[in-house]
Image (tube, grey):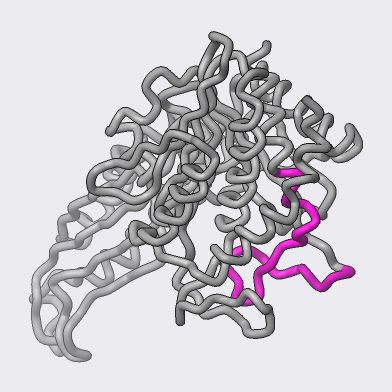
Amino acid sequence: MNVKELAKEQESYVIQCRHYLHSHPELSTKEVNTTRFIKEELEKMGVEVQEFEGITGCVGTIKGDKPGKTVMLRADIDALPITENPGKSYCSLNPGVMHACGHDCHTSMLLGAAKILSAHRDEIHGTVKLIFQMAEEIGRKSEEYVKRGALEGVDAIFGMHIWSAVPAGKVNFESGERMACSDRFTIKIHGKSSHGSAPHEGKDAIIAGAAAIQALQTIPSRINNPFNALVVTVGIFNGGTKENIIADQAELTGTVRVFNREFRNSMPEVIKSVVEPVVKGYGCSAEVDYYFGPSPLINDHEDLVQIARGAASKEMGEDALIPLKKMTGAEDFSVYMETVPGVFGYLGCRNEEKGIIAAHHHPAFDVDEDVLYHGTGIYVQFALDYLNA
């Protein structure tokens, strides 16, 4: 099978799918019509489709004629609550909703891969599963598929993301830490109210909260090993009811971004140990609630990284592979990697000559569509190379 040629043959189909999906975006967990479109396309190819109760998205299964392992290829399908800049012929038709991250591209590239793989079952040693995942934009929703058994029997999983910071024609698959976790914490501070003219009669939750914010920054600067990248951010601080009343309640909400799995797991207790004594010094108490979001995405299966690099080289040439620094953004593909071995990478889509320079989640976001068939080819090549390894 000449995957490179077959992928090129699917270019118009992939772009056609992308235009339809881009103009009909749906928000996370509400991808009903998107799921219907994917299902209909897969069934046209003779691909078995599995849906799951209570969630959108689906899984397609392509069984090869020869026995072997099972590999899963992943695409995400949700859009964002963003109003798109006008101008494209395939602009969003849903006001206030836009594919501003490239998930329409991922879905279309994987549909192109499905066409190739389903037409060449006789050359497949094993089974290829295609997961079209809902709600990547809002956290750990990928675990809903894990809970429902979608990964049962899967030996490895592969994913990639269109990337606006990487030039079109370039691709990155690299070992080690790639993206951080995205955890959330809430700190409720309880004090005692009094009149602003008699502050000594109260316990000021706002003052205690301000001190807590300062204390939290000692976690990355003094508690954390400086060789371990860590960000602790408080983005919301609410407290008080009136300008002349000492607040008896305040609430801080923030995020933690870190790569080190062990240190990440210790963060709830670390935050408590820092915050509780500080607010106690102001006569207040604190409740800390910590939510573990998507875990760090770490390519720690070198064999899969090498298969991915090989697939990208076959499709785009060895000089297409470039290094890319790890990022403190998050990706819930990491949740799958907690269950089965996996690898994740980035397909460049930036083209300054064409004016395609907007970052992800920007109203002007777009991609150089000339790269999309390469994504299809990499999906197919990785599946074949893994199953034949």
Residue 2: x and y in percent read 81, 29
Which residue shows up at 71% across the image and 58% down it? 164
Residue at 41 percent of width and 24 percent of height: 339
Q: Where the N terminus falls, by quadrant?
A: top right
Say which of 224 and 60 sits in front: 60
Residue at image coords 69%, 42%: 376
Q: Which quadrant holds residue 36?
A: bottom left
Q: Of 196 and 263, which appears nearest the observer? A: 263
Location of residue 229 (image quadrant): top right
Count the marks.
0
Position of the C terminus, as image quadrant, is top right
For residue 284, above or below residue 91:
above
Q: Is residue 355 visible?
A: yes
Write the start and end of the magenta stretch as one range. 353-375
For the residue pair 360 and 45, the one nearer the viewer reads as 45
Q: Is residue 75 left or right of residue 243?
A: right
How far across and down, in percent of the image, does residue 200 sit? 13, 76
> Does 328 appear in magenta?
no
Decide if residue 65 is on the left or right side of residue 172: left
> Does residue 156 appear in this view?
no
Please check the rendered image and state whether residue 357 is part of the magenta-colored stretch, yes or no: yes
Above/below status of 76 relative to 361: above
Q: What secondary structure is the stretch in magenta mostly built from?
A: loop
